[in-house]
Amino acid sequence: MLRVAVVGSGPSGCYTAQCLVQQDPEVLVDVLDRLPCPFGLVRYGVAPDHEKIKSLQGNLRTVLEHDRVRFLGGVRVGGPGGLPVERLRTLYHAVVYCVGAATDRHLGIPGEDLPGSWSATEFVSWYSAHPDSVAEEGFVREVRSAVVIGVGNVAVDVTRMLARGAAELSPTDMPQQALAALAASGVTEVGMVGRRGPSQARFTTKELRELGGLPDTEVIVDPAELALDPAYADPSGLPAPQRRNVDVLRGWADRPAGDAARHIRLRFFLRPVELLADGGRVGAVRFERTVPDGHGGVTGTGRFEDVEAQLVLRSVGYRGVPLEGLPFDTVSGTVPHTGGRVVRGGTASPGEYVAGWIKRGPTGVIGTNRPCAKETVTSLLADAPALVHKDVPPDPAAVLRAAGTETIGWAGWQAIERAEAELGARLGRGIVKLADWDSLLTAARTAAP
C-alpha cells in the first residue's frame, strides 16, 4: 500500500491528492499544512467579495473528506522548528511538495521600504485574516490617496477592496478588525498604475469590469495614455482577452466626468522610480513616463511625474522561496524537476515530487493546477513499484505526535469553522474569520479527540 505525503493544502495540493486516489485504488494520502486551516490561497488569497471563486472550497473539501485522504494541519516542513525534509521522507513512500510561491517580487527602487509601502500580498493577508499577517494597527488610517503598482488581477482586487464601502464588505467573511479599518478609512483616490500599455495588462476583463460597478465610485482613464499604445487605435489584431480589456477601457475614457465620492484612476506607461517620503512615511510615488520600444517592452523618456500616496501597494508578481532540504533554482524561483520529479544533482530523486507554483512558477489560474497535478501524479505512480518497498511507519501522524508535533486534523478544522460561524452570529454578520494563531488553535482544540 502506497503512502504519500502532499505538503500544502491549496488547490495544487488538493488536486494532487484527488488525482492520486482516483488513479490508485489503495493509496493513502496525508495532506500536510503548517496552518490549522486548509485550502491555501482559496481561503487566504481570494478576495472576500468573490463568493463564486471562494465556493471552490466546496470542491477542495470533498477531496480532503475522501476516506483515503487525511488533513494534518499544524505541520511545518523545513525551516526553524519545522520537520526536516530528510525526516519527512522516512515517513512516506513519496512526498509531493505543493508549497506555492510564498513571497513577492520587489521593485528595487529607493524608498520601497518606507512605512506605508506594502506588498499587495501583505494587504491581502491582512483583509483575508491570515494568521501570519504583519500589517500594523491602523493600516489604512489617515490615507486619502493610495497607489497600486501593477495591472494584474491581484492589483484589481486590492484596488476594489480600498474603494468598497462597509455595506458591501459586511456580508463577507472579512475579519472584523479589517472591516472596521476599511470602513473608517478616508481613501477617496486610488491609482492603479502599469509601466506598459492597456493591451499588455494582465488583468482579466471580468475583474476589470467589476471596478466600474462599485457604488459611488468613478473609474477614470486618460485617453491620451491609452493612445500611446500602438494596439489601442486598432485592437483587432489582439487576442480576444486583451481586445475586450481595451474595449472596456475605451468606454471609460469616453465617459464624461461624474461626481462620485471615490475615484479609481487607471494609469499606463508609467514606471515607478522612487517612493518619496513625507514625515517619515511614504507621501508620493515618482514615476517616469515610458513609451513602447517596438519590441513589446518600454523605454524611459526622462519625463517624471509625482503622484500623491499615503499608501503604496506593490503588486508586481509572486516568487517561490527555497524550502530547506530541497534544491532550488534562484533564477526561476522553482524546484528543478522533470515531469514533476525533483531533480538533485542532475538526477531525479526517488520519491520526491513537486506540483503547482513551486513547480512551474506563479502562472495560470486555479484550474491550471489540475493538469499540473496530473502530470506529477502520472510520474509518481509510474515510480510506485520501486517506491512501495521502502519501510515506512503504519501511521506517520502518530510518529509526528510522539515527536511533539500538535497535528490539527479535520475535526479541528471543523471546530474552527464552528467558531467562525459563532463569531459572525455575535457580530450580526455571517461567517467571520478568526485572524490570529491563538484564536485558531484555541478553537481547533475544542474538537473531540
Image (tube, rainbow, N blue to C red):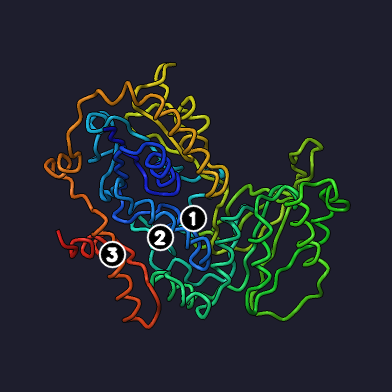
Quickly name the residue at label 3. 416
Image position, residue 121 (x, y; %): 48, 53
Quickly name the residue at label 2. 135
Please tell me whether residue 134 is drawn above or below residue 70 in the rendered image. below
Image position, residue 70 (x, y; %): 28, 48
Residue name at image x 22 percent, y 29 percent: 90
- Mark 3 to mark 2: distance in Å? 23 Å
Mark 1 or 3, which is nearer the eye? 3
Does 444 sit left or right of 255 as displayed? left
Query: Toward the viewer: 406 or 250?
Result: 406
Mark 3 or 2, which is nearer the eye? 3
Label 1: few (<14), some or many (≥20) within 10 Å? some
Residue name at image x 56 percent, y 61 percent: 157
First in sequence: mark 1 vs mark 3: 1
Residue name at image x 28 percent, y 29 percent: 93
Q: Secondary structure at mark 1?
A: strand
Query: Toward the viewer: 281 or 55?
Result: 55
Q: Residue furthest front?
A: 25
Three-letter amino acid code at disc 1? Trp
